[in-house]
Image: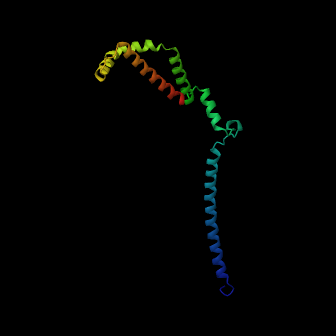
Amino acid sequence: MKLLGLNTLVEDIAYLKETLSNVEAENENLKKALAEMTEKVDEIEIPDFDPDDFVREDDVNDRIESYVNDNDIVTQSYVDDEIESKVDAAIENADIDFKVEEAIDDLDIEEKVRDLFNDASPAPMSEDDIKEEIQKAIAEVFSKVYDTLKRK
């Protein structure tokens, strides 16, 4: 048997049978794992790629602007325009002399200004001079506010 090499043939066949059974066992394990994975993949919902559900425009700024306009969201330009129109209306419609008189009476500004100017100048100011100075100062402040808002 040794001379014909049958003993090595028998050993090789036994080794091959053992290897084949190991491979078949591994193959069964792989089939089970593949079946489990296939089941998990089948459970995943495939999205509907309807083109109407996706953005078809490249101009995002226009989309944002239309969204803002459709949903009444205030923009900076709108606020600037509103402030400017309110200031313009206040300047045009306001009776500045009345407002100055009211401020002088409410805050006793006349007395404070008279005291300030009388202390600072050698000649005391009359009541009309004080009112005129206050009116000029308030008009100048309104003018600066208006110019500032207009530039923005």
Q: Horizontal and vertical percent for residue 30?
A: 62, 58
Give the x, y percent position of residue 7.
Answer: 64, 81
- Pick the front one: 73 or 111: 111
Of residues 128 and 58, the one drawn nearer to the viewer in this rendering: 128
Residue at 43% in and 14% down: 99
In the depicted structure, whether residue 37 falls above or below residue 22 = above
The residue at 44%/11% (across/down) is: 98
Look at the picture and state if 148 lies above or below 111: below
Closer to the camera, 97 or 107?
97
Does residue 111 appear to the left or right of 43 in the view shown? left
Residue 122 position by quadrant: top left
Q: Is residue 150 left or right of residue 141?
A: right
Residue 105 visible at all = no
Percent position (x, y) of residue 101?
40, 12
Q: Residue at x 45, y 20 (%)?
A: 139
- As drawn, 127 above or below 7: above
Q: Is residue 68 left or right of residue 144?
A: right
Is residue 97 at least partly visible in the picture? yes
* Extreme-front residue of the structure: 123
Q: Residue furthest right?
A: 51
Residue 62: quarter of image: top right
- 113 or 62: which is nearer to us? 113
Q: Residue at x 51, y 27 (%)?
A: 147
